[in-house]
Amino acid sequence: MTDQGTTDSHSPHAESDQPSDAAALVSHNSEINTTAALAHRCGMTHLASGRLCLLPERHAGSCDFVQPSDVESAIAGR
C-alpha cells in the first residue's frame, strides 16, 4: 500500500488482469506452427531451418521435421 491507500503497481502482490507467465508462454510460443497445431499435429518448428514436425500432437520420442513446402499437403492429407 502507498501512503494514499492504493496498491503499489510494482508490488509483487499487486492485482493484475494480465495472463500468468505460463499462459503467456503457451499462447505466444513462436516455436509452434499454429496451422499444424490446429490440425492436431506437433507443429514444433526448428527455428534454425524453419522445418516443421508434423507427427501427431503429443507424440512420443523426437520430432521428425519436414520442409515447410510439405506442410500444406501433409495437413490436407491427414
Image (cartoon, helix red, strand yellow):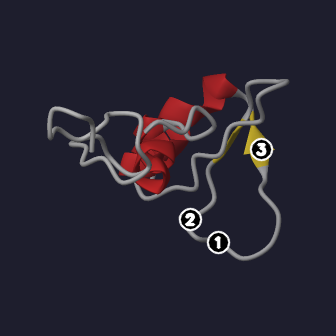
Circle 1: residue type: His
* Residue 3 picture location, percent across and down: 23, 34
Q: Amino acid at mark 2?
A: Pro
Which disc is residue 56 wearing? 2
* Rendered-image quadrant of the C terminus: bottom left
Label 3 secondary element: strand
Quarter of the rendering containing residue 71? top right
Tell me: 33 left or right of 3: right
Determine which of the numbered discs, if any, sits on residue 65 in the image: 3
Which residue is depicted at the point 51% across and 55% down? 41
- 58 w.r.t. 64: above or below: below
User: In the displayed structure, would residue 51 be above or below residue 17?
Assistant: above
Residue type at mark 3: give it. Answer: Phe
* Residue that appears at 36% across and 54% down: 13
Q: How many marks?
A: 3
The residue under label 1 is: 59
